[in-house]
Image (spheres, coloured by chain):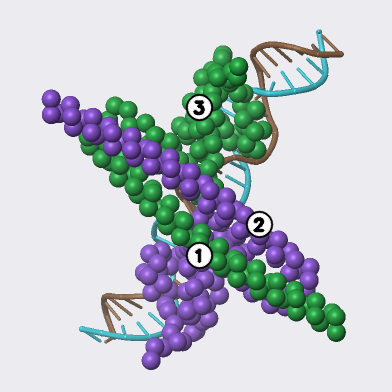
Chain colours: A purple, B green, C brown, D cyan
Amino acid sequence: MEQKNKTYSISELAKEFDITTRAIRFYEDKGLLNPTRKGQTRIYTPADRTKLKLILRGKRLGLTLDESRDIIGMYNPGQSNEDQLNTLLAKIRERKNYLEQQLHDIEVMMLDLQESENRALEALEALASKQQA
Amino acid sequence: MEQKNKTYSISELAKEFDITTRAIRFYEDKGLLNPTRKGQTRIYTPADRTKLKLILRGKRLGLTLDESRDIIGMYNPGQSNEDQLNTLLAKIRERKNYLEQQLHDIEVMMLDLQESENRALEALEALASKQQA
DNA sequence: AATAAAGTTGACGTTAACGTAAAGGTAAAG
DNA sequence: CTTTACCTTTACGTTAACGTCAACTTTATT
């Protein structure tokens, strides 16, 4: 049976995600992680590890840590009143819209890069035929 | 006939893209733009405007200005020797791979957000039925 | 007991990407 | 001629996201 309540040390996570322990502590400082402690030492649960993955995914998409913290917090509506829920919904939709924008940006940039690649390939061929002459 | 050789002032571009003139000058400082001058004053061509669009698109995808400058430079293979062209091709493909990664990240984050939205909607409904009771 | 391997908390340093004056030139409008 | 509207350069300030020691404690090993 796989241990479901596995835990991780800070250096284990650092190694796994190829970041420094300093970065992980920094994320905690900024309120994105709350590992439990065994004495002084931080102990990370699978849930903490998941949050870390969300943070890094956010970074790849250009999010600030504040934005990632917000998004992580969106997962759990918990004890919210109607106003809070509506505010949450608005933020979620805003973020989704931005993702659509990014999606479009990626498509266009991908096409641009494809053009550049073709141009470079043509230039290479031109050199090759010159060489042959 | 539409003027093909239209030009723009710095404040026109700033207004159009909703950024400050300071930012535009900063991009020039960093080597991303090279407007011509009429005396002291900067004059922007449609080509400059296009570069600015590329910069801003890059920003939306989390690129640094250095990275955007590189990408803009990729468009023109110009007078490159074979080694340079191969280096260029490698960079183009690397960037394309990263875009694929981002594409995947967006998909997953979109699903996560959808879940969050559903959860929030359920929470709202729960409140509504409670209200009715 | 001594050393090594990981962990901890400060605290100052660094880079990117502008923001924000300050001080002044230029050209059209009143 | 002076006010208004843009333009310029120079330069110091700011925020985010860590990097980089320093100084120390705890645990495991030799």
Quarter containing the C terminus of chain B: bottom right
Q: Is residue B89 left or right of residue A25?
A: left
Q: Horizontal and vertical percent for residue A15?
A: 36, 69
The residue closer to the viewer here, B79 or D4, is B79
Q: CA distance from mark 3 to mark 2?
A: 32 Å
Q: Chain of mark 2?
A: A
- Which of the numbered marks, if any, corresponds to residue B25? none
The answer to whether residue A59 is visible is no
Tell me the element at label 2.
helix
Tell me the element at label 1.
helix
Q: Amino acid at mark 3?
A: Ala
Tell me which label, 1 or 3, sits earlier in the chain: 3
Q: Is residue C14 left or right of residue C23?
A: left
Mark 2 = which residue?
Answer: A94
Q: Amino acid at mark 2?
A: Glu
State the residue at coordinates (50%, 38%): B54
State the residue at coordinates (58%, 36%): B23
Mark 3 = which residue?
Answer: B47
State the residue at coordinates (50%, 61%): B107
Tell me the element at label 3.
helix
Q: Amino acid at mark 1?
A: Val
Q: Residues within 10 Å of mark 3 (few under 14, many from 20)?
A: few
Q: Horizontal and vertical percent for residue D4?
A: 80, 22
